[in-house]
Amino acid sequence: VCPRGQRTDDNKICRECMGSPDRYDWLYLGFMAMLPLVLHWFFIEWYSGKKSSSAVLQHLTALLECGVAAVLTLLVSDPVGSLHIRSCRVKKLSDWYTMLYNPSPDYITTVHCTHEAVYPLYTIVFIYYAFCLVLMMLLRPLLVKKIACGLGRSDRFKSIYAALYFFPILTVLQAVGGGLLYYAFPYIILVLSLVTLAVYMSASEVEFFKDLLVRKKRLVVLFSHWLLHAYGIISISKLDKLEQDLPLLALVPAPALFYLMTAKYTEPSRILSEGGNGH
C-alpha cells in the first residue's frame, strides 16, 4: 500500500504524484462540482413558488456556496494554500477501484494494499461536498428565514431539506461509481441536457421563438442548457485539435432549433383532431 499522494510505478514501487491534472481531469472535476449546484437550483426553483421573490437570491447564494467550497477545496489540497493541485495520471478504470485488487498469495491471507491511485480525483470530491454542506448550513437558513416571502413556514426550508438528501446520494455515487463517471460524464451531460431541455420546453408549452422572448426565465434556462451542451462537446473532444473541434460547438443550438421547428407538428390536440377527422 502506498501513502496518500503516491502510487506504484511499473516496477511496483511507490512514487510521489508530481504531475498536474490534464484538461479532461479538470473537466471531470468541474462536472462533479456542477452536480450539487444544478440540484440546488432545481430544488430552489421547484419549492420557491411562482410568487416568491426569494428565488433569485437563493440561486445566487447557492452559487456563492459552491464557488467558495471549490476554492477552499483547492486551497486545502496539496500543495496547501495554492489553487494548483498535484495528481497521479489515470491510466485505466481499475485505478479507481484498487480495493478490488487486493492479492491473496496463498488464497487464505489477503494482503490489503488499497490506496488512491488516482490521487486526488477520488477524495477531493468528498472534501468539496463536505464544504458545500457546511457552507449551506451556515448561510442558507438565515437567508431563507429573512427573505422568503409568499411561502409557508414549512415550505421555505424544503430546498435545504432536499440538499440533505441529495448530498449523501452524491457521496455514495462518487464512492461507488467515481471511475465510471470519469469516463462517461461527457455523454451523461449531453443526454441529460437534451432530455431536460425537451421536457422543460414541452411543459412550458414553448412552440415558437416568440414564446421564448416573452419570459426572460425561459431564455435563461435555454442558455443554461446550451452551456451544458457546449461543456459536454468540449469534454468529449477535449479540444485536442482546435481546427476540428471548435466547429462542433456550432451544433449547440441544434436540439432547441429542431424542437421549435417541429413542435407544431406534434401538438397532441392537433394529432387527435386530425385523427378524428380521418375517421
Image: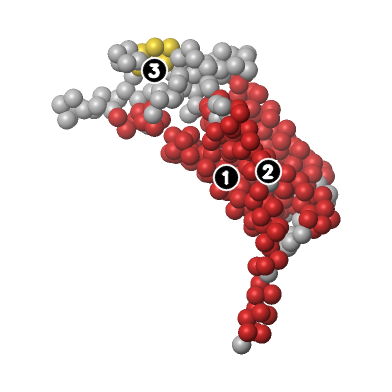
Q: Position of residue 75 (x, y in %)?
A: 62, 18
Q: Secondary structure at mark 3?
A: strand
At 45% from the left and 21% from the top, the residue drawn is: 89
- Crowding at dot 3, Cα within 10 Å, few <14 / some 14-19 / many 20+, comes out as many
Are the residues tagged 3 and 2 within 8 Å (C-beta)? Answer: no
Residue in the foreground of this view, choosing between 36 and 84: 84
Amino acid on which disc 3 is placed: Arg
Per the image, the residue denoted by label 3 is: 7
Per the image, the residue denoted by label 2 is: 226
93 left or right, relative to 222: left
The first of marks 3 and 1 along the sequence is 3
Tell me, yes or no, if residue 116 can be seen here: no
Q: Nearer the viewer, mark 3 or mark 1?
A: 1
Q: Position of residue 20 (x, y in %)?
A: 53, 17
The first of marks 2 and 1 along the sequence is 1
Q: Secondary structure at mark 1?
A: helix
**Residue 190's mark?**
1
Q: Secondary structure at mark 2?
A: helix
Q: Position of residue 178 (x, y in %)?
A: 46, 35
Tell me, yes or no, if residue 277 can be seen here: yes
Q: Position of residue 210 (x, y in %)?
A: 82, 57
What is the distance, in whole Å, between disc 3 and disc 2 at their CAs?
Answer: 39 Å
236 left or right, relative to 222: left
Question: Is residue 89 positioned above or below 100 on the image?
Answer: above
Amino acid on which disc 2 is placed: Trp
What is the quadrant of the N terminus in the image? Answer: top left
Are the residues tagged 2 and 1 within 8 Å (C-beta)? Answer: no
